[in-house]
Image: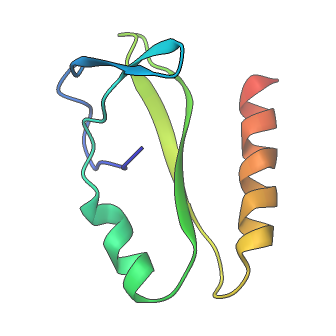
Amino acid sequence: MPAGSHPSPGVAQRGWHKRQIIHDSTGDPAFGTLWTLAGMPALCMPLMHGPDGLPLGVQLVGRRNDDARLLRTARWVQMQALA
């Protein structure tokens, strides 16, 4: 899920993923390019839905060669969002 610097313009077209219907991304993948070029692990993850029903997420960036810590942090953030 690419991150964006502004609210989503709306719900994207529906598509099929395994057995679920999902919404295609409406974000901008350019927000991950800088981290990739710098050799730093980065991920974007959905956390919740806003009042309009559209997904809200966060982009996390880790230190170089510290992918495992980034994934642990992402798991912690996810658990906090669900609590």
Which residue is depicted at the point 44% across and 89% down?
A: 38
Left or right placement of residue 70 versus residue 57 in this view: right
Q: How many marks?
A: 0
Which residue is depicted at the point 33% across and 73% down?
A: 33
Q: Quadrant of the N terminus?
A: top left
Which residue is depicted at the point 42% across and 11% down?
A: 51
Residue 27 pos. (x, y %) = 27, 43
Residue 53 pos. (x, y %) = 40, 10
In the picture as drawn, the residue positioned furthest to the front comes out as 18
Establish if 67 lies above or below 78.
below
Please name the colour scheme applied to the rendered image: rainbow
> In the image shown, does 9 or 14 lie closer to the viewer?
14
Residue 34 pos. (x, y %) = 35, 78
Establish if 31 lies above or below 28.
below
Q: In which quarter of the image is residue 60?
A: bottom right
Left or right placement of residue 74 versus residue 69 in this view: left
Establish if 49 lies above or below 53.
below
Which residue is depicted at the point 25% across and 64% down?
A: 30
In the picture as drawn, the residue positioned furthest to the left comes out as 9
Q: Quadrant of the C terminus?
A: top right
Residue 59 pos. (x, y %) = 50, 55
